[in-house]
Image (cartoon, coloured by chain):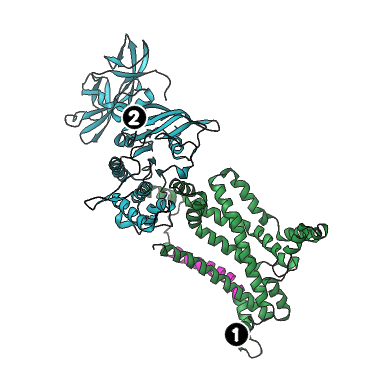
Chain colours: A green, B cyan
């Protein structure tokens, strides 16, 4: 080894006095530079709006009044509440759809895995704008065509401005790639096949296996999937705007025209809310994990 | 199910100890692969039967067919007098231990053991008592409140065993339960499994690819090959009187020595010995000889040369190179084997006993 190293050094005709220290210092400097660049990249876009919303331009001091305005801002509670409800409904629907699918693919239909994977990737390949234009065409055509029939009534119900179910349906599709990946990762690492067999061998029926074995094992992945979906719905603008529904993001944009500081303050706040949600979910997960000893 | 005996010691019982299991003409195909090829097997009540064979021989499929995880294409599975071929897994009342640790990660050790009782709707007090009793039995009473990830592999398999036994199953099925463990734990646990099995008198099927494991714990061993049983016999008989060349070579160490048959006797290593079992009348064959059925002596004029010498306590295994590229393993008593060092010239002769022979070409 040493002889080989010497030989190699000798081949170049140079015996470098290996400046280990200097190299390490240079490495440290690089590391710092990279960290600073990345830090700036993430922090500046966050710091700028915060600065914009806490500075009182007239007095040259700091103020919290833009944040204080948020709760009373016209339309805020309604839009935020609607987005939250849409988010919850989307989470419930997408999980009801995907948990059994992923489990079934893992346990019974492994040959379909590639097909399901490709299918769930489609929303990433088809741009939301294309998706929503298609949806809008159908929504424009169908109520007239089916007027007076149950289908027509359903079409109207889907577009109820107070609770636009059509958005839930579209968001389920948009969330598929994230939800599938989160669940699939959980399923693959869990050894679900053996666990379900063990439970069935002990006399458990399939529903019981799902409830007492599969869901607890997949809890972390289910929480991750829920969080990703909720974050997606709370930040989705394109679809809601084009279909003409008032949600939290469209409200922010709308308010931004007349009250820029307020709209940015709301954005900052929503970012913080999202982070808080993420922390809450992971804390919840950890606590349940340690609490289960009773 | 659980009764406190007069001495106050908990008495662990199984609902129906010693139920016989019968496989009739069991057939299962996966596409073109025949995993079970008309398998017939009778397992006596209270017996520990090991299914032994190389991977892909169908032993696990047979076990899974008994458990109900595989539906046979043809044939029947009988437990006692009852045909359970169409009974779903969850209604078969069998305890199973898997190769992969299969404990529920979200439940404590005690809750894992009590899972089957919970499914059966037993009360909390009974579940706790029974789990404690079973954990005592496998020596893990102090780990009841732990989670599976806090246990070692061997401990996890003990818990899995306790969980399988907690429901007092009719039959205990063990699917390579020791394969994921390290050597020392493996030996320890297999002895424990045997002790428990004898104590409870529960009919047990133990699937393994490790012949030492099968021979050491089982009442009888079934050697499987290509979906069929080659031989079912006690460990001694299997070792001493293998029915086929496949069994002979799969169980224990076997030397293959070129030999010739003539007139009902076999000529090998310059000696003449009777043939064991049926054999063709004349011609070249391969003699199958155990290491302990060969004798090796230091002889300056001998044709062999010692290649390696492996000491293992009471016996020492000597690898001898013979002419024509033949190598044989010979077991000798360690005392008095000092001159059998690598490089020594030796003579190898077969012991005075019948010799098993196989046809020359087809090697399993």
Reply above or below: B60 against A157: above
Q: Which residue is mark 2?
A: B251
Residue farthest along the right direction in this orientation: A144
Relative horizontal placement of residue B86, taking residue B6 as reference (left or right): right
Q: Mark 2 — on which chain does it sit?
A: B
Q: Quadrant of residue A57?
A: bottom right
Q: Which residue is mark 1?
A: A64
Any magenta on residue A42?
Answer: yes
Type of secondary structure dominating the magenta stretch: helix
Q: Position of residue A145 (x, y in %)?
A: 82, 57
Local packing at callout 1 (Cα closer than 10 Å; few below 14, some 14-19, many 20+) is few
Q: Mark 1 — on which chain does it sit?
A: A
Q: What's the magenta region?
A: A21-46
**In front: B194, or B66?**
B66
Q: Position of residue A231 (x, y in %)?
A: 60, 66
Badge nearest the viewer, 2 or 1? 2
Q: Residue at x 60, y 46 (%)?
A: A114
Q: Residue at x 73, y 78 (%)?
A: A257
Relative horizontal placement of residue B326, taking residue B87 as reference (left or right): left
Reply above or below: A27 against B86: below
Q: Marks 2 and 1: CB-CB under 8 Å?
A: no
**In front: A39, or A194?**
A194
Residue A178: tell me if it is visible. Answer: no
Any magenta on residue A178?
Answer: no
Instruction: Give the Cα distance between marks 2 and 1.
Output: 82 Å
Q: Position of residue B106 (x, y in %)?
A: 43, 57
Q: Position of residue B362 (x, y in %)?
A: 43, 21
């Amino acid at each position: 080894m040493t002889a080989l190293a010497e030989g190699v050094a000798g081949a170049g005709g140079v015996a470098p006095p290996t400046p280990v220290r200097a190299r390490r210092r240079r490495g440290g400097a690089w590391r710092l530079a990279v960290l600073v660049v990345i830090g700036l990249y993430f922090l500046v876009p966050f710091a700028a709006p915060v600065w914009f919303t806490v500075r009182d331009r007239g007095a040259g001091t700091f103020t919290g009044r833009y944040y204080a305005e948020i709760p009373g801002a016209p339309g805020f509670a309604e839009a935020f509440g609607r987005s939250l409800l849409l988010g919850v409904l989307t989470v419930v629907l997408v999980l009801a759809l995907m948990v059994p699918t992923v489990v079934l693919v893992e346990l019974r239909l492994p040959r379909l895995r590639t097909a399901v994977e490709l299918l769930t990737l489609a929303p990433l390949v088809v741009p939301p704008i294309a998706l929503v234009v298609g949806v809008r065409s159908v929504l424009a055509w169908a109520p007239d065509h089916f007027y007076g029939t149950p289908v027509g009534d359903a079409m109207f119900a889907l577009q109820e401005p107070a609770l636009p179910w059509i958005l839930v349906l579209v968001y389920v599709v948009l969330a598929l790639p994230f939800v599938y990946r989160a669940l699939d990762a959980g399923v693959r690492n869990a050894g679900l096949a053996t666990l379900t067999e063990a439970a069935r061998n002990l006399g458990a029926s399939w529903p019981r296996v799902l409830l007492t074995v599969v869901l607890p094992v997949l809890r972390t992945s289910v929480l991750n999937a829920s969080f990703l979906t909720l974050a997606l719905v709370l930040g989705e603008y394109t679809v809601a705007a084009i279909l003409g529904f008032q949600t939290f993001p469209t409200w922010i944009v709308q308010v931004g025209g007349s009250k820029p500081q307020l709209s940015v303050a709301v954005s900052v706040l929503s970012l913080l809310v999202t982070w808080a949600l993420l922390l809450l979910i992971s804390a919840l997960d950890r606590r349940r994990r340690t609490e289960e000893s009773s | 199910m659980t009764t406190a005996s007069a001495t106050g010691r908990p008495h662990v019982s199984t609902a129906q100890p010693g139920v016989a299991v019968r496989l009739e003409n069991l057939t299962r195909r996966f596409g073109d692969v025949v995993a079970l090829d008309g398998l017939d097997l009778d397992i006596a009540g209270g017996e520990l039967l090991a299914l032994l064979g190389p991977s892909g021989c169908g032993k696990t499929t047979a076990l899974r067919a008994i458990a109900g995880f595989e539906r046979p294409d043809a044939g029947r599975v009988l437990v006692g007098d009852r045909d359970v071929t169409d009974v779903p897994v969850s209604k078969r009342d069998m305890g199973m231990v898997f190769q992969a640790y299969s404990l529920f990660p979200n439940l404590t050790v005690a809750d894992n053991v009590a899972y089957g009782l919970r499914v059966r709707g037993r009360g909390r007090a009974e579940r706790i008592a029974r789990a404690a009793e079973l954990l005592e039995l496998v020596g893990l009473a102090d780990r009841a409140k732990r989670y599976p990830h806090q246990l070692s592999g061997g401990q996890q398999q003990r818990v899995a065993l306790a969980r399988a036994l907690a429901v007092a199953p009719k039959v205990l099925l063990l699917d390579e339960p020791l394969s994921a463990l390290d050597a020392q734990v493996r030996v320890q646990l297999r002895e424990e499994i045997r002790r428990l099995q004898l104590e409870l008198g529960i009919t047990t099927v133990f699937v393994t690819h490790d012949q030492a494991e099968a021979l050491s714990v089982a009442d009888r061993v079934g050697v499987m090959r290509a979906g069929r049983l080659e031989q079912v016999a006690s460990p001694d008989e299997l070792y001493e009187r293998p029915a086929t060349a496949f069994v002979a070579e799969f169980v224990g160490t076997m030397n293959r020595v070129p030999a010739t048959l003539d007139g009902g006797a076999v000529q090998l290593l310059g000696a003449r010995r009777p043939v064991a079992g049926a054999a063709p009348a004349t011609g070249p064959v391969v003699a199958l000889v155990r290491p302990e059925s060969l004798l090796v002596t230091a002889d300056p004029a001998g044709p062999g040369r010692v290649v390696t010498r492996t000491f293992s306590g009471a016996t020492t295994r000597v690898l001898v190179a013979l002419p024509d590229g033949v190598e044989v393993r010979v077991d000798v008593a360690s005392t008095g084997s000092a001159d059998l060092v690598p490089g020594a010239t030796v003579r190898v002769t077969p012991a005075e006993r019948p010799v098993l022979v196989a046809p020359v070409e087809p090697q399993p």
